[in-house]
Image (cartoon, grey):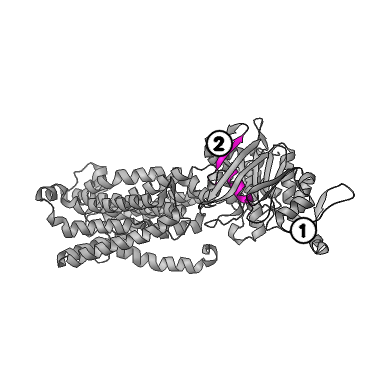
Amino acid sequence: MWDASDIRVKLSGNEVLHGVNFAARPGQVTAIVGPNGSGKTTLLRALTQEVEYSGAIALGGKDVKRLKPWELADIRAVLPQSSRIAFPFTVLEVVRLGLLNGSAATHSNIPTLALSRVGLDGYEGRFFQELSGGEQQRVQLARVLAQVWVPVAEDAPRWLFLDEPVASLDIGHQIEVMGIARDFAGAGGGVVAVMHDLNLTAIYADHVTVLAGGMCLATGTPSQVLTDETLTHAYGCHLRVNTLPENGTTFVLPHSVRQAG
Amino acid sequence: MASLDDAELEKLGPLAGDREARARRVAVFLGALLIIVSVASLATGASGTSLWRVLGAVLSGEEIATRDRVILFDIRLPRLTLAILVGAALAVSGAVMQGLFRNPLADPGLVGVGAGAGLGAIGAIVLGGLLPVAFQEAAGYFLVPLAAFFGGWSTVILLYAISTQRGRTSVAVMLLGGIAIAALAGAISGILIYMANDQQLRDLTFWGLGSLAGATWIKVATAAPLIVLALLAAPFLARSLNGLALGEAAAAHLGIPIQRMKTVSILTVAGATGAAVAVSGGIGFVGIVVPHLLRLAIGPDHRMLLPNAALLGAALLILADMIARTIVAPAELPIGIVTAVLGGPFFLWLLLRNRSLLDL
């Protein structure tokens, strides 16, 4: 499991994370939510060693800073928010970049399976640049899945770090992608996702950390964390949380803001 | 998870979007092309020496005429070798730079190799006479190439130092810093040109246009170690350069040691182009046109791009050199003019034809 404590990050001299604690367990989807500028992506970047931080981040009790880039790459894959790629690569070539073992990668069928998993069968020969934003996002997801194709390798869970994985997707594909994350966790891997959509978070996450102003506001199960009080405080507007009668799943409708006013 | 075995994969045949098989065929074709143009280059020249006559003599055990032997083994062969080395060095350096800057228009010139080498060469031509006579005699003909090499090399190292802070090299700072340093080197070159006499100006102009004339085995031996070392290092950068196309952060997440690959890339390019420019002057377009053409043919995968670029760069430079030394025979055209006349319009045609794919 990932265990981060007292994480502080300074960007150009301004501290944007003020001592955040964060934990993620294998077999779970852990969501990081919060308003714009609350430090969600920065926390993800600290976890993936993209920004310098103070505090400790441990994976299975070992300091992550001590792991080499290639050792980390074997354990976790990271889906970035933007997906610009230099040079005209085909979709197959992009997904193959996720395979770590150089020349053996050529003969692997994992890229084809990964593309099929994200609903892009038959896209292998298309040029990445010529796809729509949502398709590009799913190609990147296929690349990331190919990197950690087996959720548990040699008794150690592998991890997916997703930065707003459903940002540019239609609702059907949002559900499909969250289902992929769910299955990955179900098979014993771990998922850490920065999320904007509170409803998808309520449906698919096992554990939620709410950030606001660079601090951790609440952490726990969706029903513990997604409450009127926490969300109203975090997002600075009056939000009402409800539950579906049939299974108790939490949902938030923006309509409640106007009713309250 | 489900996985097909090899036999089932064979049945599926080549995948769409997989350009490796094509890249291999292109490599075989370019290898054959390189051999053909090499033989053609050995067989043609201003003198009447015939490669076939010499080969015939070798095969029948006759003694080769001294004149033929000198022309073939001391003039044409070193020149051919130098063309292969310089062509491969320029094309591979171009491909590596473009990968590093994630920009298909990047060129070793961007990091100031050309400007620095030019300054070194001009300094040596104009101020060489001021050096102690003993040093001038020791350096001899190598004064200009040596100065060019150190000019180019030190510019790149300076730029690398400027753009590296706390162990991280900023590619953007390097790009902009390269423009600033090239401007500065250009200004100093301008002062030296202002001071130069007519003969020096002529030497300068010809150096700037590039030429393989005067290739000797000694010149080959000076340039070869650095270029060969760089060409051997380049394949190890291929996977990293592929990953870098996704951006630096994504490449790091793939397990690529970014800082190390940047350092190796820059040292490779500085060594190879520095040595190439030192022995041949400013030969343009090879570094841009060759990788571009290959990306259109086989795609941007550097594992295939780099070896193919070496082959095509070498073959093209041999062809350009053949044109340079035969078109106005017995005189000779600077090879930089040939590559620019061929490369410029060709490059434009490529751009116009493939605008949609090049629009990054």
Query: At label 1, which amino acid type do we have?
Result: His
Q: Residue at x 25, y 44 (%)?
A: B221
Instruction: Please tell me whether mark 1 sits on a helix, a strand or a loop.
Output: loop
Q: Residues within 10 Å of mark 2 (few under 14, many from 20)?
A: few
Q: Give the Cα separation between the discs numbered 2 and 1.
A: 45 Å
Q: Residue at x 21, y 58 (%)?
A: B123
Reply yes or no: does residue A56 show up in magenta.
yes
The disc, 2 or 1, on the residue closer to the chain's N-terminal end is: 2
Location of mark 2 (residue): A71
Q: Residue at x 19, y 49 (%)?
A: B70
Task: Work out whether B329 lies above or below A46.
Answer: below
Q: Residue at x 43, y 53 (%)?
A: B95
Labels 2 and 1 share a subunit = yes
Q: Position of residue A130 (x, y in %)?
A: 61, 61
Location of mark 1 (residue): A238
Give the number of the mark in front: 2 or 1: 1
Instruction: Please tell me whether mark 2 sits on a helix, a strand or a loop.
Output: helix
User: In which chain is the residue bearing label 1?
Assistant: A
Query: At label 2, which amino acid type do we have?
Result: Glu
Q: Position of residue A161 (x, y in %)?
A: 64, 45
Magenta segment, which residues?
A37-60
Reply yes or no: does residue B57 show up in magenta.
no
Please indicate whether residue B120 sits to the left or right of residue A180 in the image. Answer: left
Q: Position of residue B177 (x, y in %)?
A: 38, 58
User: In which chain is the residue bearing label 2?
Assistant: A
Q: Position of residue B192 (x, y in %)?
A: 20, 63
Q: Residues within 10 Å of mark 1 (few under 14, many from 20)?
A: some
Task: Work out whether B127 lies above or below B236.
Answer: below
Residue B189 vs residue A143, the one in the foreground: B189
Residue B251 vs residue A236, the one in the foreground: A236
Please indicate whether residue B24 sits to the left or right of residue B34 in the image. Answer: right
Q: How many marks?
A: 2
